[in-house]
């Protein structure tokens, strides 16, 4: 591990708050210098996050860093720097700004999928119109049109996991029903398997979650392969809906659940997308560039080149101040 000396202004902190783990990393010149992770706690998340970031700073030989980018699950209250009533983390409301106070001077908070999508533009050079779908504990989407991320009134214009893909579908953690995430998000896969198992003619005990499902499918278990086919169908339906709404050139796929089963999902989703998308309108499907670290790189992209509108929505006390650091030009404007 390289230990830096002195100069800290080129450093940026990236934080990925997920349903199962929190990752914090200190980046220098687009590379990770120090990275630490911890399981997402059921309570006291602010203290755990504060301690995690302190550890990263200590290990990198840095006392404080100017800016952090934070990728967090929605819904978000960007005006106050909170996660508010999130369906996919146990501590549903989290004060991110309170957790980072004293460690960073500025923080820009973003929906996690928007951050993951933003990495493709800032660090890779994606085309001007694309979408990124994260398939993890929940399902999220980041949409970039004409080079700008869609944020909406409060930064919440991307809850594609709560699009309806089944009229008679099961209840979702958000309070709705029949949602993409309620059928194929990691938090609900076990329930979905129990639900579809008799219908696909299987009398064995259904897999106990995604890992078990993937393992059985790879060993050739017909029932598990059928179930993967059903989940791929749900994803194809969701992606086709995203394509119909936004007309992206590319849809990138990311998320822990996706990466763990990528070999099983990708070919099937590709095949099925043509069935659900408008004829001749199916977007290109690609893996997101940074694999399981996509959201972390997204948080870094948000830290170094936050979209102007996102900074405006981040009106909490750690929000970057325009002009104070002479850096408007380094912030993305389009
Ligand atoms: Zn929902």
Image (cartoon, rainbow, N blue to C red):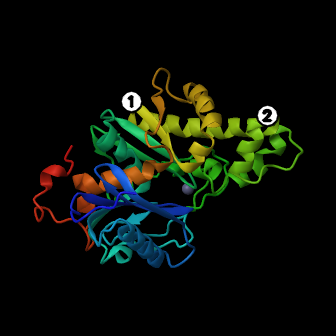
| Residue pointed to by mark 2 | 220
Q: Secondary structure at mark 2?
A: loop
The mark found on residue 11 in the picture is none
Q: How busy is the neighbourhood of tag 1: few (under 14 within 10 Å), some, or many (20 plus)? A: some
Distance, label 1 to label 2, CA atoms, is 34 Å
Residue 7 % position (x, y): 21, 63
Q: Residue at x 66, y 55 (%)?
A: 188
- The residue under the point 23% across, 57% down is 10
- Circle 2: is it few (<14), some (14-19), or many (20+) Cα within 10 Å? few
For the question of whether residue 285 can be seen, the reply is yes
Rendered residue at 54%/40% (across/down) = 238
Picture layout, residue 105 above or below residue 223: below
Q: Nearer the viewer, mark 1 or mark 2?
A: 2
Q: Position of residue 260 (x, y in %)?
A: 61, 45
Q: Residue 66: name its quadrant.
A: bottom left
| Picture quadrant where residue 269 is located | top right
- Which residue corresponds to mark 1? 249
How many labels were placed on the picture? Answer: 2
Left or right, residue 183 beside residue 304: right
Residue 115, percent from left and from top: 38, 51
Give the answer, above or below, for where 100 lies relative to 311: below
């Amino acid at each position: 591990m390289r230990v830096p000396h002195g100069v800290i202004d080129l450093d940026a902190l990236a934080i990925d708050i997920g349903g199962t783990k929190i990752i914090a990393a200190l980046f220098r010149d687009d590379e990770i210098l120090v990275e630490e992770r911890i399981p997402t706690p059921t309570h006291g998340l602010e203290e755990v996050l504060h301690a995690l970031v302190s550890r990263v700073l200590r290990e990198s030989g840095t006392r404080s860093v100017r800016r952090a980018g934070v990728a967090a699950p929605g819904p978000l209250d960007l005006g106050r720097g909170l996660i508010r009533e999130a369906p996919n983390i146990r501590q549903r409301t989290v004060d991110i700004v309170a957790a980072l106070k004293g460690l960073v001077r500025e923080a820009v908070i973003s929906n996690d999928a928007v951050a993951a999508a933003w990495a493709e533009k800032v660090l890779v050079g994606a085309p001007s119109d694309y979408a990124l779908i994260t398939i993890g504990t929940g399902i999220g989407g980041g949409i970039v049109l004409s080079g700008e991320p869609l944020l909406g009134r409060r930064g919440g214009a991307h809850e594609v996991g709560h699009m309806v893909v089944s009229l008679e579908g099961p209840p979702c953690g958000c309070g709705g029903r029949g949602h993409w995430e309620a059928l194929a998000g990691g938090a609900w896969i076990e329930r979905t398997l129990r639900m579809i198992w008799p219908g696909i003619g299987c009398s064995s005990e259904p897999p106990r979650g995604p890992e078990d499902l993937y393992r059985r499918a790879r060993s050739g278990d017909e029932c598990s392969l059928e179930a993967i086919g059903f989940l791929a169908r749900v994803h194809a339906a969701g992606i086709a809906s995203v394509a119909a709404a936004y007309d992206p050139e590319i849809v990138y796929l990311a998320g822990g659940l996706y990466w763990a089963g990528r070999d099983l999902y990708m070919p099937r989703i590709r095949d099925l997308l043509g069935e659900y998308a408008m004829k001749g309108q199916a977007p290109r499907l690609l893996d997101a560039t940074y694999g399981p670290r996509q959201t972390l790189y997204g948080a870094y992209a948000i830290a170094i080149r936050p979209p102007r509108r996102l900074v405006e929505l981040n009106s909490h006390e750690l929000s970057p101040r325009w002009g104070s650091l002479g850096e408007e030009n380094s912030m993305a404007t389009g």
